[in-house]
């Protein structure tokens, strides 16, 4: 247990340690082996947690680490020397943060250019807006998450570093952030509090970021201009759907709204009850050694989901690589109070409302534009010389991408006149061009002017709708002009 000791501990060192421990816990026996010293103690369970933490801090300052174990009804404090540690200064934190600001902004330049339909990608405007509307909101969520861990560690008198941000490639430009816990966790309460503090803090920031992103998107909604290739579909977690129920949004997701979405996903990933994740800390505090079974089940579930979303395979193997079993706290004997277990319920709720089994999926675009008559209307009518008849029809985009559409009138009788206007609008034209986003529809009217010198019979007017991405559809309208005597007799 004496890591780093080059010789057997002296009697003076053993007595010094015994005196230090006896101040908090009466020692009735000392066991000295070649690799460990164990102090058998009497404890008061009501004061165990506070007294052990005081001992831990005192021994830390003296260069030792105490580890409390229970074996066959006896309580033993094993002691080992504090390992020599060398930490980098805060300058590295600032450098990594600055680099991550750049990589996230560059990554978002692609998304911002696509969002606003910019032809260029590497422009100053895209960089500035990518930084403002994506990088800063996302890094704020990640930073607050890690600062939640940091401040809770400080509160529990556990040494920890400031956040390290990890720069990465697109599409996010970062692999997140982490803090370094620079000493063992003292007890289950500290393990639980430090583990849950980050997800709660990040979650509370992701909510206003998402709301702001939806509002910004609604102020200037954008639609997908894709007419070829694949389309990325973002699955919304329960919490995002609840927000959208109060603040509906249209068009493609604004970069700030996407940053909020990433924040919720990060919260869910960290709360997975496996290994060294925040969720792993929480279940270890709640279930002790039995937490390893929860960890195994979680990774098994991730690998199963990986059959549908490959990202979970990578993440599952990463957890396995880092270790499925969680290191116990120094005091693994003290039990959590019942009110502390409420945080376990909070963690479960956050995981459920933030997790999505398939976060992003790639789908081939669907091109489906149709024309149809108004309900109850016909494509044929009776018209008289010198009159104007009207046909009402709808153009609807049932596909998944924006379509550029043109309406034309290629077929109509010689001497006749025909034109379009949008329903309840006065703008008229014989050719009508417009763009339609997915789910959008337009109510159109075809006006047909019948000349004075018209012959009786059935006359056909054709409407052709062409779509730029390919395909066309036509509607045929029939105008029946009755013989003159029928017109007279009917008056």
Image (spheres, grey):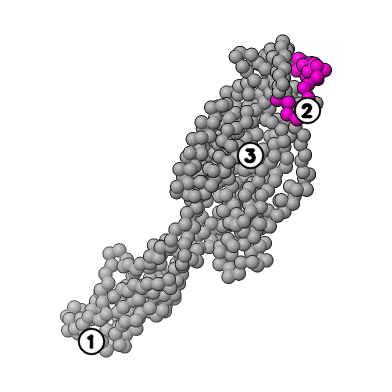
How would you rate the neighbour count of disc 3 (Cα within 10 Å): few for under 14, some for 14-19, many for 20 or more?
A: many
Instruction: Say which element carries label 3.
Output: helix
**Picture coordinates of residue 68 (x, y %)?**
67, 21
Disc nearer the start of the sequence (3/1): 3
Can residue 452 be seen by looking at this rendering?
yes
Residue 403's place in the image compared with 482, above or below, is above
Q: Is residue 126 magenta?
A: no
Disc nearer the start of the sequence (1/2): 2
Q: Residue at x 27, y 80 (%)?
A: 460
Residue corresponding to mark 2:
6
From mark 2 to mark 3, how far is it between C-alphas?
Answer: 40 Å
Disc 2 + disc 3, Cβ < 8 Å? no
Q: Is residue 19 magenta?
A: yes
Res. 451 image quadrant: bottom left
Q: In the image, which disc is placed on residue 124?
A: none
Q: In the image, which disc is placed on residue 198?
A: 3
**Picture coordinates of residue 401 (x, y %)?**
45, 64
Quick check: 163 left or right of 218?
right
Please provide the residue range marked out in magenta: 1-24
Residue corresponding to mark 1:
455
Instruction: Say which element carries label 1.
Output: loop
Res. 85 image quadrant: top right
Quick check: 189 left or right of 424?
right
Can residue 396 be seen by looking at this rendering?
no
The quarter in which the N terminus is drawn is top right
Quick check: 141 left or right of 242?
right
């Amino acid at each position: 247990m004496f890591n780093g000791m080059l010789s057997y501990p002296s009697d003076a060192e053993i007595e010094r340690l015994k005196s230090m421990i006896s101040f908090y816990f009466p020692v009735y026996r000392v066991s000295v082996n070649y690799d460990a010293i164990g102090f058998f103690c009497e404890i008061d369970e009501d004061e165990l947690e506070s007294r052990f933490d005081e001992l831990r801090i005192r021994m830390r300052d003296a260069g030792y680490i105490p580890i409390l174990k229970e074996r066959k009804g006896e309580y033993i404090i094993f002691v080992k020397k504090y390992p020599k540690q060398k930490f980098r200064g805060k300058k590295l934190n600032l450098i990594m943060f600055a680099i991550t600001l750049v990589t996230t902004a560059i990554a978002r330049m692609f998304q911002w250019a696509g969002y606003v339909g910019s032809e260029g990608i590497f422009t100053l405007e895209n960089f500035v807006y990518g930084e403002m509307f994506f990088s800063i909101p996302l890094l704020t969520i990640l930073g607050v998450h890690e600062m939640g861990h940091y401040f809770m560690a400080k509160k529990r008198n556990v040494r920890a570093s400031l956040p390290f941000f990890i720069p990465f490639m697109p599409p996010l430009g970062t692999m997140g952030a982490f803090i370094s816990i620079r000493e063992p966790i003292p007890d289950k309460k500290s393990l639980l509090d430090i583990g849950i503090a980050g997800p709660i803090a990040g979650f509370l920031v992701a909510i206003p970021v998402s709301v702001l992103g939806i509002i910004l998107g609604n102020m200037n909604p954008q639609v997908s201009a894709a007419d070829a290739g694949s389309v990325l579909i973002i699955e919304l977690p329960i919490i995002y759907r609840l927000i959208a129920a109060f603040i509906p949004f249209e068009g493609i997701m604004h970069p700030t709204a996407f940053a909020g979405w990433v924040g919720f996903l990060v919260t869910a990933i960290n709360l997975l009850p496996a290994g060294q994740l925040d969720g792993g800390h929480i279940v270890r505090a709640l279930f002790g050694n039995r937490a390893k079974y929860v960890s195994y089940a979680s990774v098994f579930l991730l690998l199963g989901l990986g059959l549908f979303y490959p990202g979970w395979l990578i993440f599952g193997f990463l957890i396995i690589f880092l270790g499925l079993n969680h290191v116990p706290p120094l005091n693994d004997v003290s039990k959590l109070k019942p009110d502390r277990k409420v945080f376990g319920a909070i963690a479960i709720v956050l995981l459920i409302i933030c997790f999505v089994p398939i976060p992003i999926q790639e789908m081939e675009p669907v091109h489906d534009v149709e024309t149809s008559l108004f309900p109850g209307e016909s494509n044929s009518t009776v018209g008289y010389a010198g009159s104007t008849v009207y046909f009402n029809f709808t153009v609807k985009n049932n596909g998944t991408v924006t379509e550029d559409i043109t309406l034309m009138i290629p077929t109509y009788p010689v001497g006749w006149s025909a034109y379009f206007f949008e329903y309840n609008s006065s703008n008229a034209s014989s050719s009508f061009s417009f763009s339609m986003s997915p789910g959008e529809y337009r109510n159109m009217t075809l006006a047909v002017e019948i000349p004075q010198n018209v012959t009786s019979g059935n006359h056909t007017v054709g409407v052709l709708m062409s779509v730029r991405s390919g395909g066309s559809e036509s509607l045929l309208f029939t105008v029946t002009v009755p013989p003159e005597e029928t017109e007279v007799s009917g008056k």
